Image (spheres, rainbow, N blue to C red):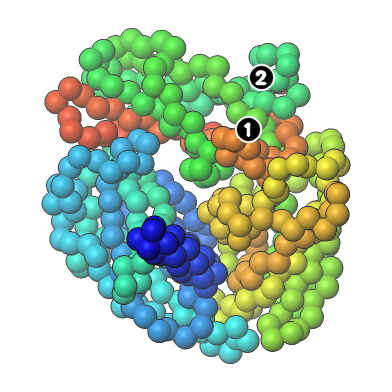
């Protein structure tokens, strides 16, 4: 009995520790050098920069590890020596304190490759960051590709009457132009990622058609979803068409205008869920301030399931930290501490299999990426052999 109680107490301690850690870890960005927007798929020779903030002054050291994974993001059955040149579990020694900000924070960043580590193989990788007590504070997934076949993604409106108003239909074609045969004994897996959101990707095992020179995956259906909403807090003291009010209580408070659930499709150019850190100062990583951003939403109906706010800024995470507070039957609010910049976000409702948008329209502009994996009989891990990308902004009706 005592052991059982101790186990329960330990569980709640770890849960509270993880939640408190997630509250102070902010503004995680994974991008190649010279780019403003984050990404998850890179060429194998790209220099990848990972940065994040810890609210408050630096108190502990942080370390990172890298793990090679299969197409489902499970650890591969190969040793680190096979995919890493050098070593990981490296202390992050590049950090700077915020300057002239009301909210103090420490900005950490590191690059891959670096003098201690180089990744040798293409494939899926999970980068995990730990504190000095080996508590994981966050992880991010990246895909490295090298010498891949180009895939073509064709996007049309759904062919089924029941889904006609809300769905988009994809066909993905990989054509081999190098006289290397798509092997009938190989195992192929296709992963399709919408708007860089790996939490809602779809995986397909068998193509509809396979020949020696072509793989065709057909009739792949996605809900269209809705366009992302946005606000820009680059000028942290100014109101705008998205920002209703700005005031100050210990830190800035940014109140957004109330969002309304869409009943009909409205064209709204967006960044497919991304966010770009920005401020009117030179060293934006350390001079941009934080504000308490107040979101509000009015829905068309009373939802029994919880509603969450997601975007790249929180890695599309469905957790208590991002759950909207239900003020009354159709009205929700949420406060989030966010760094200055341009943010895309949307509201989703939790489902048994994950989450879905509050509204769905076949016209919605979405970015789709298709990643083709192959594992031959003699292989011990999945290799990336194909990649394709397309946008539904020119969807065929």
Which residue is labeled 1 in the image?
392
Can residue 281 be seen at all in this image of the molecule?
A: no
| Lower sequence index among marks 1 and 2 | 2
Which marked residue is nearer to the observer: mark 1 or mark 2?
2
Q: Position of residue 236 (x, y in %)?
A: 71, 76
Residue furthest bottom as drawn: 100
Q: Quadrant of the C terminus?
A: top right
Q: Residue 62 lies in what quarter of the image?
A: bottom left
Quick check: 343 left or right of 80? Answer: right
The correct choice, above or below, for 364 with respect to 99 in the image is above
Q: Position of residue 160 (x, y in %)?
A: 68, 14
Q: Position of residue 227 (x, y in %)?
A: 71, 43
Which residue is labeled 2 in the image?
158
The correct choice, above or below, for 150 with respect to 345 in the image is above
Q: Residues within 10 Å of mark 1 (few under 14, many from 20)?
A: many
Can residue 309 be seen at all in this image of the molecule?
A: yes
Task: From the viewer's side, name the closer residue of 91 and 278.
Answer: 91
The correct choice, above or below, for 216 with respect to 369 in the image is above
Mark-to-mark CA distance, 1 and 2: 13 Å
Q: Quadrant of the N terminus?
A: bottom left
């Amino acid at each position: 009995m005592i052991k059982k109680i101790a186990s329960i107490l330990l569980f709640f301690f770890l849960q509270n520790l993880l939640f408190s850690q997630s509250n102070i870890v902010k503004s995680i960005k994974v991008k190649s050098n010279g780019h403003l927007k984050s990404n998850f798929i890179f060429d194998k020779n790209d220099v990848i920069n990972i940065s994040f903030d810890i609210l408050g002054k630096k108190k502990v050291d942080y370390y990172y590890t890298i793990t090679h994974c299969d197409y489902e993001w499970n650890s591969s059955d190969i040793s680190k020596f096979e995919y890493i040149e050098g070593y990981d579990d490296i202390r992050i020694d590049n950090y700077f304190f915020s300057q002239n900000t009301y909210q103090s924070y420490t900005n950490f960043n590191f690059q891959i490759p670096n003098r201690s580590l180089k990744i040798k193989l293409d494939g899926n990788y999970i980068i995990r960051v730990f504190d000095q007590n080996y508590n994981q504070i966050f992880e991010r997934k990246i895909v490295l590709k090298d010498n891949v076949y180009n895939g073509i993604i064709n996007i049309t409106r759904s062919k089924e009457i029941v889904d006609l108003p809300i769905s988009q239909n994809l066909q993905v074609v990989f054509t081999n132009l190098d006289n290397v045969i798509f092997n009938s004994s190989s195992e192929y897996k296709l992963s399709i990622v919408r708007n860089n959101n790996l939490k809602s990707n779809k995986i397909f095992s068998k193509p509809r058609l396979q020949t020696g020179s072509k793989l065709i995956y057909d009739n792949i259906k996605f809900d269209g979803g809705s366009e992302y909403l946005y606000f820009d807090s680059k000028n942290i003291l100014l109101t705008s068409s998205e920002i209703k009010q700005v005031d100050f209580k210990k830190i800035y408070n940014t109140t957004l205008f109330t969002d309304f659930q869409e009943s009909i499709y409205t064209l709204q150019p967006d960044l497919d869920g991304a966010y770009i850190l920005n401020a009117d100062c030179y060293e934006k990583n350390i001079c941009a301030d934080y504000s308490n951003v107040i979101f509000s939403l009015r829905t068309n109906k009373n939802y029994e399931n919880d509603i969450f706010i997601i975007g790249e800024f929180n890695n599309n995470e469905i957790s208590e930290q991002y759950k909207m507070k239900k003020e009354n039957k159709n009205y929700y609010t949420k406060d989030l501490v966010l760094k200055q910049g341009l943010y895309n976000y949307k509201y989703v409702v939790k489902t048994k299999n994950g989450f879905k948008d509050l509204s769905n329209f076949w016209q919605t502009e979405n970015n789709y990426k298709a990643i083709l994996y192959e594992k031959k009989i003699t292989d011990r891990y999945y290799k990336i052999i194909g990649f394709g990308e397309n946008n539904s902004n020119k969807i065929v009706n």
